Amino acid sequence: MRRLMSILCLPALCLSLAAQAVTPAETEALVKEAIAFAKANGKDAAFKEITKVGGRFHKHGGELYVFVYDLDGKVLAHGQGAAKVGVNQINAKDPEGREFIKERVNLAKGKGKGWHDYIYMNPKDNKKEPKTSYIEVWEHLIFGAGIYKK
């Protein structure tokens, strides 16, 4: 009977774990982990691992990933893949016209870390959704990750 209950409850447990929302604490921890990885393994190794889809800095089916920009708005690494790397996004606007990369760079230059809001395409459902990202500067680079506001 106990084994039968375990088997019956397992799908419910897996479903609830898969459906868990990404938390701000998890987002900040992932950014800090990426910086620690860069410190331990070098920037190039970190950029490669961050850009690797499905790698250690790619969580929740692609909804949570790390990105790295320089202080001019150029993408150095991005969890959505290599196509974004090398592109200067400083003038990028979200669907509401917000220059969110300029805001990110200004936050980085002013405070060195923090959260900022914008609208972005959620890779899980391809819908434009409100998002907030945590960024932290290390070695004149902006490491960040974001979560969708539900």
Image: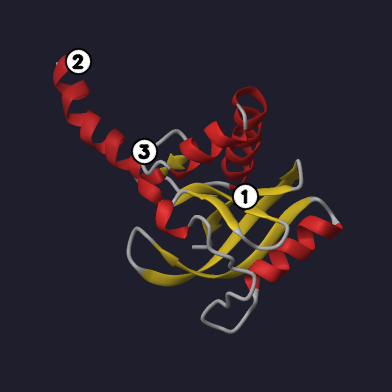
The foreground one among 21 and 85 is: 85
Which of the 4 quarters of the picture holds residue 55?
A: top left
Label 3 to label 1, Cα distance in Å? 24 Å
- Left/right placement of residue 142 relative to residue 128 reads right
Find out whether the residues at labels 3 and 1 contact each other: C-beta distance under 8 Å.
no
- Left/right placement of residue 55 relative to residue 1 reads right
- Mark closer to the observer (2, 3): 3
Where the N terminus falls, by quadrant?
top left
Q: Earlier in the sequence, mark 2 or mark 3?
A: 2
> Of helix, strand and loop, which one carries label 3?
helix
Which of the 4 quarters of the picture holds residue 28?
A: top right
Q: Please report the residue visible at 47 percent of the width from the left and 70 percent of the height from the top.
A: 129
Residue picked out by circle 2: 2
Q: How busy is the neighbourhood of tag 2: few (under 14 within 10 Å), some, or many (20 plus)? A: few
Label 2 to label 3, Cα distance in Å? 22 Å
- The spot of residue 21 in percent (x, y) is 46, 49
Q: How busy is the neighbourhood of tag 1: few (under 14 within 10 Å), some, or many (20 plus)? A: many
Residue picked out by circle 3: 17
